[in-house]
Image (tube, helix red, strand yellow):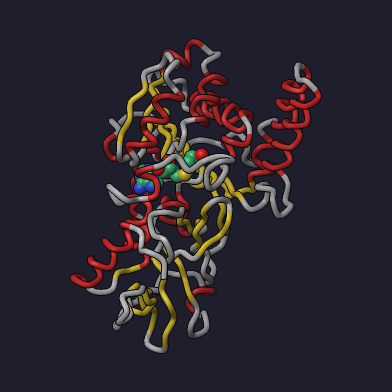
Amino acid sequence: MSEPSPLEKEIRRLIAVGGPMPIARYMSLCLTHPQHGYYMTRDPFGVGGDFTTAPEVSQIFGELLGLWTLSVWRMLGEPDAIKLIELGPGRGTMMRDALRAAKVLPKFREALSVHMVEISPTLQQVQRATLADTDVPISWHRYLLDVPEGPSIILGNEYLDALPVHQVVKQPDGWHERVIGLKSNGEFALGLAPDPLPQFDRFMPKKIKEAPLGAIFEWRNDIDAFDIARRVRENGAALFIDYGHVESDIGETLQSVNEHAFSDPLSAPGLADITAHVDFFIFGQAAESMGAAVQGPITQAKFLRELGIDARADALRRNATPEQAATINDAVARLTESSRTGMGDLFKVIAICDPKLGPLPGFPS
Ligand code: SAH
């Protein structure tokens, strides 16, 4: 057995004193423990890091989202003050590209204030450096609830997948929370909470209610969808891009990624990224229950095509060297193709907004 990571020692201690912990608590510690959490101490993005996200693939991604934001501001009736909020902004690349594209309209630029919601002090520093030359007011917050009220447009790319996920397992007497305990030698052992969660599947789709014994179901706390919906249900809109499923389904998607390869989520806590697919159905349902409207989800490919990714790529290619043109072609393929390496079909786009708004840009009417 290799030497346990500092966080592994800490989690063993927490389990030894507090008993087995739900997967969601484990995931939350792995990603955001103040000293040892994966995002708290490092910049994991890019070729030299653990994974690459759409804004890091091409500037076109952020630019198109910037133009999306501008159009939505118009649909909201051009309020004189609009908050552009990004949840989990990583390196800040998407915001930099979005602002460059959207600021072309002076009236919008004057109305705009930017709010970065980022839990990691390390990544906040990276974002400050990325956005150092920006001339619109920007502030940083640890939580969405800390952002002042007012008309808001929220963006989040690969944010929801990083929020802690619970796993429950179907047993004859109901669904039991999956927990992590300790073997006698101190290693982690997966187990089940002794009692079922009362009436867990009461409001779940049929597919979950009728799942076979032993089935695993993953769910996230609705609180994030509630907070987002509460903010945008009047004079606002939110857009999330992530991998996941359009309908709730059973199955385990919790995964750990390190140096661009999958690893066991229970090994090396704090040293690898841990994510799980987004259940867009449940997310949308929670937002609707708070009085917001839902548009989509649609595939990333459809969304980016609708927003004009091909025309933007053509424009960039016109001033490009042959090598640059090849890079642009590769990036567009990566963002829109449905092949194994493509993000086009795996990634979905969902909007949560004020019900009085018509179809938002990119979404079918
Ligand atoms: N949007 C970026 C980064 C995605 S990774 C991109 O597409 O490149 C997830 C981001 O969410 C990181 O910036 C991480 O630090 C942040 N994050 C994770 N959990 C968070 C939480 N609970 N609150 C706020 N930010 C969080």
Looking at the picture, how far across and down is residue 121, in whole percent? 32, 37
Closer-to-camera residue (149/47): 47
Give the residue at the far top of this rendering. 106
Looking at the rendering, which quadrant does residue 4 occupy?
bottom left
Looking at the picture, how far across and down is residue 34, in whole percent? 27, 47
Looking at the rendering, which quadrant does residue 132 occupy?
top left
Instruction: Report the quarter where the N terminus lies.
Output: bottom left
- Which residue is rendered at x = 59% and y = 49% of the image? 348
Give the residue at the far left of this rendering. 17
- Which residue is rendered at x = 54% and y = 20% of the image? 102
- Which residue is rendered at x = 46% and y = 53% of the image? 273
Instruction: Report the quarter where the C terminus lies.
Output: top right
- Which residue is rendered at x = 61% and y = 33% of the image? 61
Relative to residue 83, is residue 52 depicted above or below? below
Give the residue at the far bottom of this rendering. 172
Give the residue at the far right of this rendering. 322
Q: Is residue 355 in view from this perspective?
A: no
Looking at the picture, how far across and down is residue 128, in whole percent? 39, 25
Q: Is residue 13 in view from this perspective?
A: yes
Relative to residue 97, is residue 122 depicted above or below? below
Closer-to-camera residue (78/6): 6
Indicate left or right for 51 with 131 as reference. right
**Looking at the image, in which quadrant does ligand 1 appear?**
top left
Relative to residue 340, is residue 229 depicted above or below? above
Q: How many marks?
A: 0
Looking at the picture, how far across and down is residue 118, in whole percent? 36, 38
Closer-to-camera residue (137/353): 137
